[in-house]
Every structure is written in structure tokens, then in C-alpha cells.
């Protein structure tokens, strides 16, 4: 065990972060710390680093072990370059090399004991330098920088001139090179493109020490971690496995607890109903039986209802009208900035109902493409055409659609004057803004809060073509899952840019990768893209420069070289969607029949208490037979429901 936290307690005033929370990290273990925004994840990392005092409890780092910490906000030393900043992480190695070179120069002028002593020092330093892989030090620094997305021409950039995201990448690279026994990483994938995230995954999987990560990137956590530490409502629990295993186990536990609670509540209500009926007979025997049941009821130990998750967003996206089948057609589009070509002569089409994800490295022009389609920027050449009845809803990651001087309430009321006060408040409540929070100015909001306001406006727009730029930025995992569900149930068309591979996997039916100044088309989700990328890149590399990524299923995804592959994938996807729709429909019908029969049985029970019924033996037999048949059918329906629910 390299790190142990026992009975941690921490609160800010009345807000409890953690109460008697315990967890541990083993040597070489890769673990995640998860929880909703505001649960206290970053606070726990700061407590481990002694940057934030705990109210009680013990934090123990194994003797002689080193710890490294990447916070969300970085302060680099002023005046240095990117390369020099990373080089400082291996300052001892470079100092050792300097001493070796100095001794090599001195040896020419020494003899006797002085020469022997200096040679002994030289050999010792040389041996240590080799054992610590000193000769590969500079190439390792270069490899880390390139892995994190820096080009060689950027190595000499002054750190003072870097953006916040670039500074985070520099700090991450510097931390990785220090090789501590345990790494604490707070949102390490922020500001990384897909290639850099993939590189970091491989680096951390093979890292010889332990890693403790706070991240909302579920795909990243699935690949890297083998244990999940969850903080929820002040409690800490540990789960073995990656994020997917944790998510499934957590849901199983919650479902089991909820089922136990509901079963008990159902039994209590049933017993209470029987007691009331027995009492209503107003006979000595029935009253004694009612009292006996009441005593049994009092002895029941109540099962606690599972705590609901923290306040969540809940919303649906529904277009006000249906567009034509042809939603977007792009022809010959080109754009460059300051002589740098972002994309050139690209062509593609989007059909109604498609969910298209645009991916690619940072700086390749993905956001620029969306801005051109929303007429925020102009293309250098080429054109695009929107189809009939297409209404665009735009989500801008920089939130230019919001007005800093307005309050949240005004932002909604000014754009949707037909909504009354109650409707606006209900809408904002769905996005976690309640009470006086609705009167906060936009300029005072965090990135995540601005994102929620933008999503609220998007929901109200009733657009049938959503164009989204990094919609999951600043959202916690729960909110991402709610957005995923909303998009998957959305009947309109979606085009979005995202670095969130889990989100892409859940919501995309097609991927456009911006690479080498053009778009490569893949029919399928992110897993399919990974599977086909190498094959398709070769196909496009041998094609003509004017790449056409149109949405024809017989062509898309393989450059036209093997239509059957992508066509089959498209057909399979449609079949799966049809099966899922049938399953949901059957599930709904089953639930409705269960409800109807249960209501009928309740009605029969009531009828059996009526004198004109229980005094009529023929009618009693008829009702008893009907109830028995209902019970038999209910047993079949319950089994059918369980099968459909699975």
C-alpha cells in the first residue's frame, strides 16, 4: 500500500465534503476518483497534498515514497521556454552530465593520486548516469512533448505566451518526467486532443508507479484504471474494475436496494390495506386479526430508501418541424488563417436523422467549420446549402450566444418572450438553476454553468438541426449521460465537434475526421472508427486530392473501395435500432397490461368485501376464478417484463 486515507472528515461551513471516508491505493495501482461536480474530488487531492487541511482523519504516504500532483490551474516559472521547463524536471541528470564533461576535461591535466581519485568519481558518475538512462533523457523529453501535442518548432516558445491549456500540457509533461511513486492527476485530459489522450493512456497504463486520477473522461478511465473510488453525498466507496465495471456495479447495488425498499413499501401498503379492511368489518374477530397484523407491522425494520443522486439536469430535445431529407450539402469549402490552410476543397452531405461527429487534432479547423456553417465566419471559397425547412440550433463552446451583461433569467426571457415567469423558472430548474440563482449575471458564471444556460436555450429553440461545439466540456459524468440520452432520443439531425470518445461512441452514427486538410468519412461510432482508421487512411491517401465525403452509405467509410463493408454496418445499425424500438414498445405494452390487471385485482378485492357479493356464492366463485386467472397471467407478464428490461 502506497497511500492510505482513514476516516477523513472535511466540511466548508454547513457543506459536508466527506464524513469518515476511507480508501487506499496500492503500489503500481491505477485508480480513479469520481463524483459529480462539487462533490469534493479536487478537495480530496488537495488534502492529500497538504494544500487543504482535513478536519479529522489520517493521510498516510508510505515511507520513502514520492508523490507528484497535477492541479487544474498551473503556474510555471516565468521567462523559460517549453523545452527548458521540461528539462528542469531532469535537472539532476543534466547536472550529472555537466560534471562528467568537466571531469573529462580535467583528466588531461591530472596524474598520480589526483588522477586516480578523479577517475573513481568519473566512473561512479558514469555508472549512475547510465543506470538512470541519462543518454536517452533528451529523446524522452522530446517524446513526451510530441506525445502531448507539441511540434518541434514550438519547443522554444516562451511559457509566458502560452494559453491555459498549453500550460497544463507543459505541467503534465514535466510531472510525468519526474517519475514519482504515485501521480495525482486532476483532469489530465483537459486541453488534449484525441491523439494526445491516446498517448497519455498508453503512458499511464505502462507507468511503473501508482496513479490516482480525477477525470470525467469515461473512455480514458475505462482504458487506464483498475479501481474506482467514488465520493457521493459525503460518503466514499471503493469499486474494483474500470469505469464501466463501476457504473454497472453501482447500478446493480442501487437497483437491489431500491427493489428491496419498494418491495417492503408494497408489503407495508398491502398490510395496511388489509388492516383497514378488517377493521371496516367492525367485528371482534376481524379487529383482533387487524391488531395482530399491526403488531407484525411495527416489528418490521424499515429499509432505507437509496439516496437520490444530486440535482441533475433533465431535459428533452424536440424539433418543432421536420426538415427535408437533405439537411446540409457542402461543396468545395476551403479556409486558411495567416497562410495556414485548415481545410481545402472539402465536400460532404448530411441527411435527416444523422448524428455526425467531427473529430481531429487541435488547430485543424473543426470549430472553424461549425462557425462557417453558422455564418459566424466566412469561407475563403466553396459553399454550403441548407435543405428545406432546416432550422439550426447552435451550441458554441465559447458561449458567444450568451450576453455577459444579462442575468440568466433575462437570457431566456429576452430570446423567448412568449414564455411566462413560471415557464422560464421551470426550464432553468431543469438545468439546476433555482431560487435567486436565476438572477446571476452571465459574466459571473463558471464554464460549466454557462454551458447549462446554453443547453437550456438549445432545448427551447426547437431546432431540427443541432450544431454543437464541444457540448460535454465542463459537464460532470451524470450530466453527460443525461445529454447523451437527450440526443439519442432526438428525432432531428446533429453535427458536433467533440473530444469525448465515450460521448461519441454513445451518440454518433457517423464520423468525419479532419486530417491532412480534408475530411475522411466513417459510417459508425468511435469504436468502428478506430477499427477502420488505418485501412481507410491508406485508401484516402491513394485517392485524388479532392476528397468527397458524401453520406451515401454505399460509399462512405471506405473511400468507395469496399462498399459492402460500410453498407453492412449501416444495415446492421438500422436493424439494431429497429429491434430496440420494438423492445421498448413491447416493454411499454407489458407494463400497461400489468398495471391493468393489478388494478382489476384491487377492484375484485374490494368487491369481495361487499355484502351483495360475498353473500352470493356464485358471484364469489366467478370473482375468485377471475382473480386466479389474473394472478397466473401476472406471473407470466412479470417474467416477460424482466426479459424485456434486460
Image (cartoon, rainbow, N blue to C red):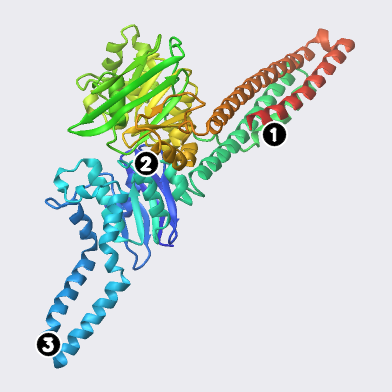
Residue behind mark 1: 296
SS of the residue at dot 1?
A: helix
**Quadrant of the image for the N terminus?**
bottom left
Q: Note whether residue 436 is visible.
A: no
Measured as percent of width and height from the top left, residue 601 is found at 74, 17
Measured as percent of width and height from the top left, residue 504 is found at 44, 33
Report the front residue among 552 and 414: 552
CA distance for labels 1 and 3? 99 Å
CA distance for labels 2 and 1? 61 Å
Residue behind mark 2: 194
Q: Furthest-right residue in view?
A: 618
Specify few, some or many for label 1: CA neighbours under 10 Å numbering under 14, 14-19, or 20 or more.
Answer: few
Report the front residue among 132 and 291: 132
| Residue found at x 89% / y 11% | 618
Q: Is residue 439 left or right of residue 98?
A: right
Q: Is residue 387 left or right of residue 531?
A: left
SS of the residue at dot 3?
A: loop
| Residue contact between numbered discs 3 and 2, judged by CB atoms under 8 Å | no
Discs 2/1, front? 2
Specify few, some or many for label 2: CA neighbours under 10 Å numbering under 14, 14-19, or 20 or more.
Answer: some
Q: Earlier in the sequence, mark 3 or mark 2?
A: 3
Up-down: is 31 above or below 545?
A: below
Measured as percent of width and height from the top left, residue 463 is found at 39, 14
Q: Furthest-bottom residue in view?
A: 112
Q: How many marks?
A: 3
Q: Earlier in the sequence, mark 1 or mark 3?
A: 3
Residue behind mark 3: 110
Amino acid at each position: 500500500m502506497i497511500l492510505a486515507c482513514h476516516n477523513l472528515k472535511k466540511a466548508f461551513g454547513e457543506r459536508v465534503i466527506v464524513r469518515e471516508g476511507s480508501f487506499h491505493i496500492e503500489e503500481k495501482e491505477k485508480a480513479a476518483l469520481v463524483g459529480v461536480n462539487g462533490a469534493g474530488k479536487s478537495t480530496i487531492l488537495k488534502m492529500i497534498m497538504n494544500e487543504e487541511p482535513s478536519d479529522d482523519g489520517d493521510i498516510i504516504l508510505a515511507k520513502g515514497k514520492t508523490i507528484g500532483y497535477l492541479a487544474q490551474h498551473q503556474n510555471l516559472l516565468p521567462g523559460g521556454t517549453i523545452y527548458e521547463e521540461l528539462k528542469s524536471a531532469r535537472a539532476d541528470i543534466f547536472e550529472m552530465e555537466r560534471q562528467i564533461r568537466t571531469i573529462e576535461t580535467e583528466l588531461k591535466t591530472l596524474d598520480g593520486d589526483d588522477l586516480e581519485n578523479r577517475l573513481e568519481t568519473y566512473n561512479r558518475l558514469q555508472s549512475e548516469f547510465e543506470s538512470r538512462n541519462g543518454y536517452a533523457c533528451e529523446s524522452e523529453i522530446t517524446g513526451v512533448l510530441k506525445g502531448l501535442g507539441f511540434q518541434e518548432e514550438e519547443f522554444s516558445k516562451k511559457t509566458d505566451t502560452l494559453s491555459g491549456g498549453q500550460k497544463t500540457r507543459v505541467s503534465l509533461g514535466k510531472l510525468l518526467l519526474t517519475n514519482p511513486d504515485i501521480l495525482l492527476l486532476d483532469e489530465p485530459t483537459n486541453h488534449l486532443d484525441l491523439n494526445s489522450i491516446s498517448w497519455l493512456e498508453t503512458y499511464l497504463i505502462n507507468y511503473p508507479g501508482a496513479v490516482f486520477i480525477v477525470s470525467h473522461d469515461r473512455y480514458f478511465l475505462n482504458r487506464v484504471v483498475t479501481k474506482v473510488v467514488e465520493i457521493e453525498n459525503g460518503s466514499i466507496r471503493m469499486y474494483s474494475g474500470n469505469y464501466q465495471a463501476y457504473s454497472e456495479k453501482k447500478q446493480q447495488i442501487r437497483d437491489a436496494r431500491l427493489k428491496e425498499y419498494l418491495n417492503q413499501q408494497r408489503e407495508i401498503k398491502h398490510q395496511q390495506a388489509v388492516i383497514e379492511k378488517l377493521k371496516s368489518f367492525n367485528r371482534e374477530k376481524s379487529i383482533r386479526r387487524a391488531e395482530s397484523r399491526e403488531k407484525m407491522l411495527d416489528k418490521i425494520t424499515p429499509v432505507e430508501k437509496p439516496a437520490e443522486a444530486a440535482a441533475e439536469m433533465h431535459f428533452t430535445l424536440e424539433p418543432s418541424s421536420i426538415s427535408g431529407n437533405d439537411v446540409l450539402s457542402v461543396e468545395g469549402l476551403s479556409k486558411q488563417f495567416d497562410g495556414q490552410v485548415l481545410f481545402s476543397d472539402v465536400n460532404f452531405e448530411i441527411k435527416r436523422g444523422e448524428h455526425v461527429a467531427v473529430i481531429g487534432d487541435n488547430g485543424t479547423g473543426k470549430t472553424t467549420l461549425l462557425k462557417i456553417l453558422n455564418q459566424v465566419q466566412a469561407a475563403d471559397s466553396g459553399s454550403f446549402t441548407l435543405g428545406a425547412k432546416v432550422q439550426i440550433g447552435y451550441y458554441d463552446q465559447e458561449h458567444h450566444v450568451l450576453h455577459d451583461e444579462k442575468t440568466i433569467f433575462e437570457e431566456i426571457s429576452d430570446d423567448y418572450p412568449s414564455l411566462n415567469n413560471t415557464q422560464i423558472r421551470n426550464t432553468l430548474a431543469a438545468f439546476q438553476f433555482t431560487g435567486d440563482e436565476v438572477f446571476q449575471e452571465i459574466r459571473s458564471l463558471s464554464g460549466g454553468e454557462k454551458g447549462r444556460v446554453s443547453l437550456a436555450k438549445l432545448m427551447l429553440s426547437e431546432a431540427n438541426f443541432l450544431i454543437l461545439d464541444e457540448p460535454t466540456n465542463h459537464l460532470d459524468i451524470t450530466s453527460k449521460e443525461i445529454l447523451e440520452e437527450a440526443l439519442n432520443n432526438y428525432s432531428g439531425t446533429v453535427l458536433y465537434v467533440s473530444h469525448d470518445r465515450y460521448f461519441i461512441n454513445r451518440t454518433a452514427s457517423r464520423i468525419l475526421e479532419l486530417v491532412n486538410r480534408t475530411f475522411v468519412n466513417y459510417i459508425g461510432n468511435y469504436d468502428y472508427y478506430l477499427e477502420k482508421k488505418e485501412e481507410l487512411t491508406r485508401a484516402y491517401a491513394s485517392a485524388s486530392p479532392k476528397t468527397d465525403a458524401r453520406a451515401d452509405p454505399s460509399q462512405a467509410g471506405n473511400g468507395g473501395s469496399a462498399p459492402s463493408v460500410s453498407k453492412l454496418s449501416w444495415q446492421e445499425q438500422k436493424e439494431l435500432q429497429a429491434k430496440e424500438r420494438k423492445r421498448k414498445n413491447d416493454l411499454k405494452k407489458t407494463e400497461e397490461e400489468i398495471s391493468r390487471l393489478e388494478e382489476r385485482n384491487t377492484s375484485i378485492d374490494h368487491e369481495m368485501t361487499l355484502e351483495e357479493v360475498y353473500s352470493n356464492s356464485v358471484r364469489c366463485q366467478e370473482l375468485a376464478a377471475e382473480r386466479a386467472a389474473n394472478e397466473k397471467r401476472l406471473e407470466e407478464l412479470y417474467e416477460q417484463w424482466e426479459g424485456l428490461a434486460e
